[in-house]
Image (cartoon, grey):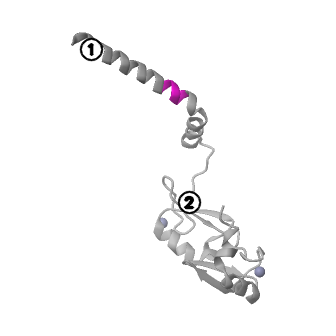
Amino acid sequence: MKSFSLLAILITICLLNISNAAFSKGNPVLSDSNFIEQSDPSVAAEYCPVSGEKIEGSGVAFTYLDTKVKFCCEGCEKSFKKNPAKYLKSGVIDPVCGMSETNSDITSVNDGVKYYFCSESCKKKFEKDPSKVLEKYNN
Ligand SMILES: [Zn+2]
Ligand SMILES: [Zn+2]
């Protein structure tokens, strides 16, 4: 009985060594990037474009066409989707032709998200098949 438990301990030690070795060999890049993300002071704090509050943790991420946006909470994400042009300082693009000159009176809401167009003809193209237009913005 005594020798059996000793053997069990030895096997456990061997297994632990193997898994430690596998871990340190397998994920050096991942652990490095994690380290940078958590401790690099040059990474600026992010602020919610809707509430203006500092985003703690990962926040709520949403990609509006070609622009990645982060919010402090889902409530702010909802407010943004209803009125993206109000919160995007860089402006909004027409998803059909890609122009940055959009008319705030020519809009369409798809899946709770508002889109802006340069002209009625782009809006018509969008409303004919929104998923096809938005497809090219989904990475
Ligand atoms: Zn919020
Ligand atoms: Zn257009």
Residue 51, relative to residue 16: is it above or below?
A: below
- Find out whether the residues at labels 1 and 2 contact each other: C-beta distance under 8 Å: no
Q: Earlier in the sequence, mark 1 or mark 2?
A: 1
Stretch in magenta: 20-24
Relative image position of residue 35 (x, y in whole percent): 56, 37
The residue under label 1 is: 4
Q: Is residue 31 left or right of residue 98?
A: left
Question: Could you tell me residue 54's position as x and y percent?
Answer: 52, 58
Q: How many marks?
A: 2
Which residue position holds label 2?
47
Asked whether the viewer can see residue 89, the reply is no
Quadrant into which the C terminus falls? bottom right
Crowding at mark 2 (Cα within 10 Å: few <14, some 14-19, many 20+): some
Which part of the image, by quadrant, shows the N terminus? top left
Q: Position of residue 69 (x, y in %)?
A: 60, 63
The residue most toward the top is 3
Q: Nearer the viewer, residue 112 or 75?
A: 112
Q: Is residue 118 above or below residue 92?
A: below
Residue 52 in sight in this render: yes
Residue 120's label in the rendered image is none
Q: At x 56% / y 34%, what residue is drawn?
A: 27
- Classify 10 Å Cα crowding around label 1: few (below 14), some (14-19), many (20 and above): few
Name which residue type carries label 2: Tyr
SS class, disc 2: loop
Residue drawn at (51%, 30%) of the image? 23
For the residue pair 113 and 83, the one nearer the viewer reads as 113
Horizontal side of 13 relative to 123 (left or right) equals: left
In the picture as drawn, the residue positioned furthest to the left comes out as 1
